[in-house]
């Protein structure tokens, strides 16, 4: 019922997907320009020195020699392989000479990634608040006006959420790489598959643990700490169900994203990303409304009362 109503609400408010696509495109463009303006002068010397090594041509010659047999000397060594080894050594020397600018670039990338994540969660906050307006009273607010009106609240919440997410992401990356390397010792393909499924599982666990945080903050008008406490209370009752839903949803999104990306030469991933964002927020909201026993609009003609049986709760004529 919750999953079905989540899809129904997403379809009813499908315009949110287009709005998220537009916001993401603008954000990616702006952050891309800012990133280039910062990184270009910082890493220009390092990149210039790397280009002088001819890495691409050396790698190309080595790959050709493997299939053609050219470059194999009498002692069995491959001259192209030796050339590639020398280039790797030169890369190490060049990297050591530019270590200051490289660290500066890494720090800049991390800062930009954090800022983009904060902005993205502010966008999700706007999506969630817009869904709340629809579900609670069949009202509709403009996406941009909603974002501006809630700028302060969404910024504070996004900072807190991203702060928690960074810690979770470190765990996700650590576990994924660790299991990937362990399985990769036996088989490289198995290592890649293991790393991907570990990442999906740990991301699903993170989402299931914090699924009620944003809805509690918006719907119940609590403080960040109060909404986080209510979120954990809710998670203790619904964690197993939510974990399964998010794992399947993230797996389906990954598969669909790969297919769409290949078919659209990379552009379609933003569409899949935006659709997943709206659907997951709708699912969080439906789950929270059920937890609180609040009536909600599934679409403009039907109201659902979580305290009653499903057939009794879906009404053609809106009642109190």
Image: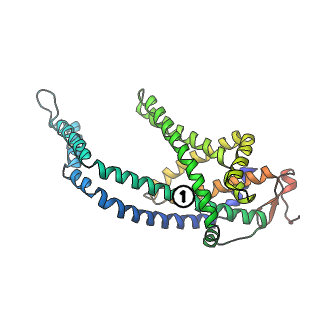
* Residue 258 versus residue 13 in the image, above or below: above
Q: Which residue is drawn at 64% across and 56% down?
A: 279
The quadrant of the image that shows the C terminus is bottom right
Q: Where is residue 217 in the image (x, y as percent from the top left)?
A: 70, 56
Q: Where is residue 98 in the image (x, y as percent from the top left)?
A: 26, 49
Between residue 256 and residue 33, name the one nearer to us. Answer: 33
Q: Position of residue 285 (x, y in %)?
A: 71, 55
Between residue 12 and residue 36, name the one nearer to us. Answer: 36
Between residue 69 and residue 59, name the one nearer to us. Answer: 59
The residue pinned by badge 1 equals 118
Helix, strand or loop at disc 1? Answer: helix
Q: How crowded is mark 1: few (under 14 residues within 10 Å), some or many (20 or more)?
A: many
The answer to whether residue 6 is seen in the rendering is no
Q: Where is residue 259 in the image (x, y as percent from the top left)?
A: 49, 51
Q: Which residue is drawn at 57% across and 40% down?
A: 202
Quadrant location of residue 124? bottom right
Left or right of 100 on screen, residue 273: right
Q: Residue at x 61, y 68 (%)?
A: 147
* Residue 95 versus residue 72 in the image, above or below: below
The answer to whether residue 306 is seen in the rendering is yes
* Residue 235 versus residue 264 in the image, above or below: above
Left or right of 128 on screen, residue 111: left
């Amino acid at each position: 019922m919750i999953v079905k109503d989540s899809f129904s609400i997403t379809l009813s408010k499908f315009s949110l997907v287009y709005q998220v696509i537009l916001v993401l495109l603008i954000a990616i463009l702006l952050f891309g320009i800012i990133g280039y303006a910062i990184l270009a002068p910082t890493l220009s010397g390092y990149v210039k020195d790397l280009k002088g090594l001819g890495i691409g041509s050396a790698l190309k010659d080595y790959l050709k020699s493997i299939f053609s047999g050219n470059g194999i000397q009498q002692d069995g060594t491959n001259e192209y392989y030796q050339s590639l080894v020398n280039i790797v050594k030169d890369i190490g020397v060049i990297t050591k000479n530019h270590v200051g600018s490289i660290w500066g670039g890494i720090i800049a990338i991390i800062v930009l990634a954090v800022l983009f994540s904060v902005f993205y969660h502010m966008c999700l906050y706007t999506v969630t608040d817009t869904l709340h307006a629809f579900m609670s009273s069949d009202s509709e607010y403009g996406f941009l006006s909603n974002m501006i009106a809630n700028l302060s609240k969404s910024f504070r919440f996004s900072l807190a959420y991203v702060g928690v997410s960074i810690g979770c992401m470190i765990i996700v990356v650590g576990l994924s790489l660790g299991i990937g390397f362990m399985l990769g010792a036996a088989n490289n393909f198995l290592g890649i598959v293991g790393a991907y499924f570990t990442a999906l599982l740990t991301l699903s666990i993170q989402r299931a643990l914090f699924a009620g945080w944003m809805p509690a903050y918006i719907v119940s008008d609590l403080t960040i700490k109060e909404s986080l406490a209510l979120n954990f209370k809710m998670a203790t009752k619904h964690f197993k169900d939510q974990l399964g839903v998010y794992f399947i949803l993230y797996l389906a999104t990954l598969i669909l994203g790969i297919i769409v990306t290949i078919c659209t030469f990379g552009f379609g991933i933003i569409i899949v990303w935006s659709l997943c964002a709206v659907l997951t927020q709708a699912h969080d909201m439906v789950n929270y409304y059920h937890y609180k026993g609040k009536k909600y609009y599934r679409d403009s003609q039907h109201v659902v009362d979580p305290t009653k049986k499903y057939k009794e709760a879906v009404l053609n004529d809106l009642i109190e």
